[in-house]
Image (spheres, grey):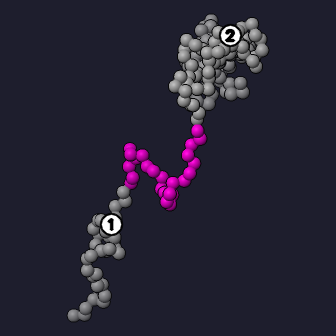
Amino acid sequence: MDNSRGYLVHHALDAIYEVHSRQTGKDYVVNLVKRTCTCFGFQATGLPCFHAARTIIFAKGNVNDYVDKWFTVVEYCKTYKNGILPPTAALDVDALPVFNMESEDINSPALSPALESDVDIRYDSDGNNDTMLPPDTRRPAGRPKKRRIRHQVEEERQKIMRCSRCGEEDHNRRTCKEPVKYQGRPESA
């Protein structure tokens, strides 16, 4: 909430406020009834953005009252009350384990007696063991590459070689085939 100090709030209509940023010079419109802001942060996250938080403080409200209900502890407990089953490819969708809701012990969820004998989590229907093995960590033979492997889209910059002796491209002074021009003393006439 410290970041909301750099905003000036002006009351426009009933629950509509104009917020001016001192830092960027931009203006935002916050509607507290609809829980909207023109930066769309309030609508996207369900939490008041800095503009909305500054507006709520300006209107002498509690910022926690404007947080969407699914962020509350009560809704969090409702979400995880029945538990979340891991996705298993080995089990048939119709034969998923059913938890007894009478059992309050979270550490030992009881399967219904009808499904207890049918569920075998260790193997799939073919009897193959689906265990994940670690990746191969052996180094390949030979000297490691020094340069990174470039992507196909990435173009390697080609530096044009130019000879300093004759001025032509595709070779340098060391590999130049032109005869050496002698630049000695000028002949006297």
Front one among 107 and 90: 90
| Quadrant where the image shows the N terminus | top right
Q: Residue at x 72, y 15 (%)?
A: 109
Residue furthest out toward the right: 105
Q: Position of residue 117 (x, y in %)?
A: 64, 15
Which labelled disc corresponds to residue 82?
A: none
State the image coordinates of residue 35 (x, y, percent, origin top left).
Answer: 61, 12
Within-10-Å neighbours for mark 1: few <14, some 14–19, many 20+: some
Q: Main secondary structure of the magenta part?
A: loop
Q: Is residue 138 above or below residue 100?
A: below
34 vs 154, nearest the viewer: 154
| Residue 109 left/right relative to 145 | right
Q: Which residue is mark 1?
A: 162
Q: Which is more foreground, mark 2 or mark 1?
A: 2
Please give the name of the residue rendered at 27% of the width and 89% of the height, measured from the top-left corner.
186
Q: Is 135 colored magenta in this rendering?
A: yes
**In terms of image quadrants, where is residue 21?**
top right
Determine whether label 2 and label 1 are within 8 Å by CB.
no
Could you tell me the amino acid type at mark 1? Arg
Does the magenta-highlighted stretch encompass residue 155? yes
Type of residue at label 2? Pro
Identify the residue at image location x=32%, y=74%.
175
Location of residue 102 (image quadrant): top right
Q: Residues within 10 Å of mark 2 (few under 14, many from 20)?
A: few
Q: Is any part of residue 109 visible from this angle?
A: yes
- Residue 55 appears in the picture as rendered: no
Residue identified by numbered label 2:
113
Q: Is residue 134 left or right of residue 3?
A: left
Place of residue 166 in the rendered image (x, y in percent of width and height, measured from the top left): 28, 73
Does dot 1 land on a helix, a strand or a loop?
A: loop
Magenta-drawn segment: 133-157
